[in-house]
């Protein structure tokens, strides 16, 4: 759901960010700048961690389209996060091929290990997790990905989850 | 085993870089096509090759190309569909990850054949690492003079861009993909007009799968006739199969079409049988959308002939006792897997991924998910199976795009072949939540493989 009441979200669109937008827009024919919407929303999410309504309004203004055209896209595609998440959002594949090699038990384990339910953020703000649909890595399941670079972790076990969480925790302290 | 056409050099160190790819004969197809062939001659070779779309539908690629409208003064586009998200399929990720220049080379040759000056590769957003790899490969190819203005001095200009999606299975459907590329929700368009007449920005457009475009490279290098010699009947050439699930050796394999299914399933060169010495219960041969088959029907057709990995043989028996080649997403299920749970899982996937445009799909997938959920958790009724078949029949064929069909087929086929397992979930409700039905009579007729310590 869109958080239209969220007005204090960060909207620090630096000149560097805008120049990245310009670069993307240049890939499409003149007048078809709306094509840049999906890639630009990825950049916004990379910068702010999620896609807020005020940020979308600025994107709409930049692309010279109506705000609703941005909202309808952001709410359609599952990758765009419409509320703040943990610094590391663990997106675990839960579809068929991963499920038959243990993805569901792994999700239970992650939930128990982090002490938060799907969609919730740990008190230190570091982690959140959610089940996602097929990530096209079915031979290496169970798998998870972590944005914004969508680094992949394959053939996961409870032990490798322990290690991953420990590594990310210590990385965040440095 | 025949010669590999796409993955021949996959294990060469550094094959993801331009220098190594070039040293292994890379970009020869671009040189041959642009310098010695006309665009129509390239289309002709692809027609001769008999190449069929590798994304799932299996439509002849050359014929698709020949439908492209060519009005004067209107831009034409080639869009590569790299929105790989069919559960069970991971071949395109593999190809883009390890040998990105093969796709770039195929894109240049194909764009030349179609007269496109700007082409896009639409990659699903989750494949950000592969997007970076492709962007680097494009920059290398451009530096080497294979992209940009006046390629190889032939006067042909081409710009190639990568476009990230936003995580929507539906964008694998070509018109939804074009909507998405235009910056909109991925709602499939009503056809006609087909993209060949009015596609991206209303201009004539061809949308092809990653593997189809990559296959154009060996077709141009060796000639369409040579390519057509591989395979059986109308299934020509090689195909990438993504083997997953409970197989011993999961991974991406390039096979000659027509390879016996039994060899693919049990030979150590391919899947190596089922992991942990277990037995094969069922197989989804072409991605989650195609009908699931019990092991005995998968290995042999209803006429007791050996089944082959080809478009025709996998479909032998129609939907009564056959399946489909689909996208080559091969999922094997061992004796401990529950068909009801798997069907529920797939249906939840389709419910989640339905774009919501057509009521039969938007509502029907949700109803099927709910009914399957109650069956899986021991609260089902014996009438639920007929209810599911009824709902699936009312989705099938009644939607704008094939997602509805794709959601209906796995449910209908699971009930057709595994009805006793569904009924057991009703009659043994409390037991069904603690243990699985097992292999029953679906077992493959082959002897149980020895357990390797």
Image (spheres, coloured by chain):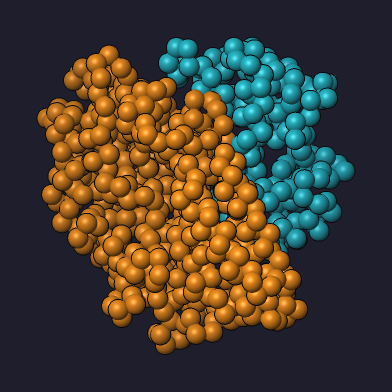
Chain colours: A cyan, B orange
Position of the N terminus of chain A, as image quadrant, is: top right
Relative height, residue B267 to residue A9 (above, below) = below
Residue placed most toward the observer, B433 or B152: B433
In-image side of B426 versus B181 (left or right): right
Residue B276 visible here: no
**Rendered location of residue B159, percent (x, y):** 35, 22
Please count the marks in the image.
0
**Rendered location of residue B167, percent (x, y):** 57, 40
**Rendered location of residue B83, percent (x, y):** 48, 41
Relative height, residue A71 to residue B227 (above, below) = above
In-image side of B30 versus A33 (left or right): left
Residue placed most toward the observer, B268 or B261: B261
Relative height, residue B252 to residue A15 (above, below) = below
Instruction: Identify the residue at the far right of this view.
Output: A123
**Rendered location of residue B348, percent (x, y):** 63, 55
Residue B7 visible here: yes
Q: Residue at x 70, y 71 (%)?
A: B380
Position of the C terminus of chain A, as image quadrant, is: top right
Q: Residue at x 40, y 70 (%)?
A: B320
Q: Residue at x 62, y 78 (%)?
A: B423
The image quadrant that residue B313 belongs to is bottom left
Residue placed most toward the observer, B246 or B8: B246
Q: Residue at x 18, y 51 (%)?
A: B227
């Amino acid at each position: 759901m869109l958080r239209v009441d969220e007005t204090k979200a960060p909207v620090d669109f630096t000149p560097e960010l805008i120049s990245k937008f310009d670069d993307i827009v240049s890939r499409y024919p003149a007048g078809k700048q709306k094509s840049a919407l999906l890639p630009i929303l990825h950049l916004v999410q990379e910068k702010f961690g999620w896609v807020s309504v005020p940020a979308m309004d600025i994107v709409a203004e930049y692309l010279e389209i109506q705000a609703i055209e941005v909202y309808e896209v952001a709410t359609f595609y599952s990758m765009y996060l419409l509320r703040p998440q943990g610094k590391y959002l663990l997106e675990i594949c839960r579809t068929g091929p991963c499920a038959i090699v243990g993805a569901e038990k792994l999700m239970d384990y992650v939930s128990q290990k982090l002490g938060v339910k799907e969609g919730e953020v740990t008190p230190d703000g570091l982690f959140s997790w959610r089940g996602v649909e097929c990530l096209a890595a079915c031979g290496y399941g169970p798998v998870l990905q972590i944005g914004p670079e969508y680094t992949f972790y394959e053939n996961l076990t409870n032990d490798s989850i322990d290690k991953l969480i420990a590594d990310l925790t210590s990385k965040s302290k440095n | 085993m025949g010669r590999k056409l796409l993955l021949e050099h996959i294990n060469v160190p550094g094959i993801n870089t331009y220098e190594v790819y070039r040293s292994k004969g890379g970009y020869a197809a671009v040189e041959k096509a642009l310098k010695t062939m006309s665009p129509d001659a390239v289309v002709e070779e692809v027609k001769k090759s008999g190449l069929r779309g590798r994304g799932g539908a299996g439509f002849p690629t050359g014929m698709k190309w020949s439908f492209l409208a060519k009005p004067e003064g209107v831009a034409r586009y080639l869009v590569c569909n790299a929105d790989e998200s069919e559960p069970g399929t991971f071949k395109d990720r593999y190809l883009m990850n390890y040998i990105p220049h093969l796709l770039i080379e195929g894109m240049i040759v194909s764009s030349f054949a179609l007269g496109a000056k700007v082409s896009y590769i639409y990659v699903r957003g989750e494949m950000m690492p592969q997007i970076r790899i492709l962007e680097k490969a494009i920059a290398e190819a451009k530096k080497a003079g294979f992209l940009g203005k006046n390629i190889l001095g032939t006067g042909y200009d081409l710009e190639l861009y990568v476009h990230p999606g936003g995580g929507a299975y539906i964008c694998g459907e070509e018109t939804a993909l074009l909507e998405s590329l235009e910056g909109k929700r991925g709602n499939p368009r009503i056809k006609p007009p087909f993209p060949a007449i009015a596609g991206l920005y209303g201009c004539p457009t061809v949308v092809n799968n990653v593997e189809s475009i990559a296959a154009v490279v060996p077709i141009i290098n060796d000639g369409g006739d040579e390519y057509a010699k591989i395979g059986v009947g109308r299934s020509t050439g090689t195909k990438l199969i993504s083997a997953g699930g409970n197989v011993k050796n999961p991974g991406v394999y390039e096979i000659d079409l027509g390879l016996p299914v039994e060899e693919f399933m049990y030979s150590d060169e391919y899947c190596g049988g089922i992991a942990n010495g277990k037995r094969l219960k069922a197989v989804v041969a072409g991605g989650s959308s195609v009908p699931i088959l019990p092991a005995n029907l998968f290995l042999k057709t209803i006429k007791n002939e050996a089944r082959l990995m080809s478009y025709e043989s996998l479909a032998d028996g129609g939907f009564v006792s056959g399946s489909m080649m689909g996208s080559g997403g091969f999922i094997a299920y061992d004796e401990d897997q529950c068909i009801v749970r798997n069907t529920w899982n797939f249906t939840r996937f389709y419910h989640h991924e339905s774009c919501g445009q057509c009521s039969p799909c938007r509502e029907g997938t949700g109803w099927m998910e709910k009914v399957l959920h109650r069956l899986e958790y021991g609260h089902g009724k014996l009438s639920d199976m007929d209810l599911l078949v009824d709902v699936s029949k009312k989705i099938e064929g009644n939607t704008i795009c094939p997602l509805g069909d794709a959601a209906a087929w796995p449910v209908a086929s699971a009930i057709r072949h595994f009805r006793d397992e569904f009924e057991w979930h009703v009659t043994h409700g409390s037991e069904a939540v603690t243990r699985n039905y097992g292999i029953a009579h679906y077992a493959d007729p082959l002897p149980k493989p020895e357990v390797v310590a």
